[in-house]
Amino acid sequence: MATNTEQSMEQLRAEIATLKSDLGNIAETIKRMSGEAVDEGREQLKDKARRSRNQAKDTWHAVENEISERPATSLAAAFTVGFIISRLLDR
């Protein structure tokens, strides 16, 4: 017949085994959740990069159109900006 202490030890061993199993399950859940968060972040980053690239292309096309519609004004503006930058760099 098992003593009270032996029964308590068996219960403790069983609870420790259950705890190990639960911790393993928690670790797996955290690993899965972090992987999902990384994937979601990666997709958001790709989406933002795509939108930024499209916006840059649209802006570039708008600048090209403005230059082709007003070449003299664009040339004068470019000359003025270059002149101002050269003056600032000479100092």
Image: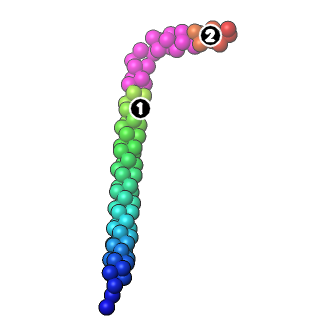
The residue indicated by pointer 2 is 88
Residue type for callout 1: Ala
The amino acid sitting under disc 2 is Leu
Residue placed furthest toward the bottom? 1
Give the quadrant of the N terminus.
bottom left
Residue 80 drawn at (x, y percent)? 54, 9
Q: Judge the density around disc 2: few (<14), some (14-19), many (≥20) Cα neighbours within 10 Å.
A: few
Q: Tell me the CA gap for discs 2 and 1.
A: 28 Å
Q: Which residue is found at the position 35% from the left and 63% from the top?
A: 26
Q: Which of 14 and 29 is in front in this view?
A: 14
The residue at 54%/12% (across/down) is 81
Q: Is residue 12 above or below residue 29?
A: below
Residue 10 in sight: no
Task: Residue at 39% x, 63% y: name it.
Answer: 27
Q: Is the magenta stretch mostly helix, strand or loop?
A: helix
Image position of 38 with respect to 45: above or below: below
Write down the region rendered in magenta: 61-82
Q: Mark 1 points at which residue?
A: 56
* Total numbered labels placed on residues in the image: 2
Task: Locate the C terminus and report the quarter of the image it occupies.
Answer: top right
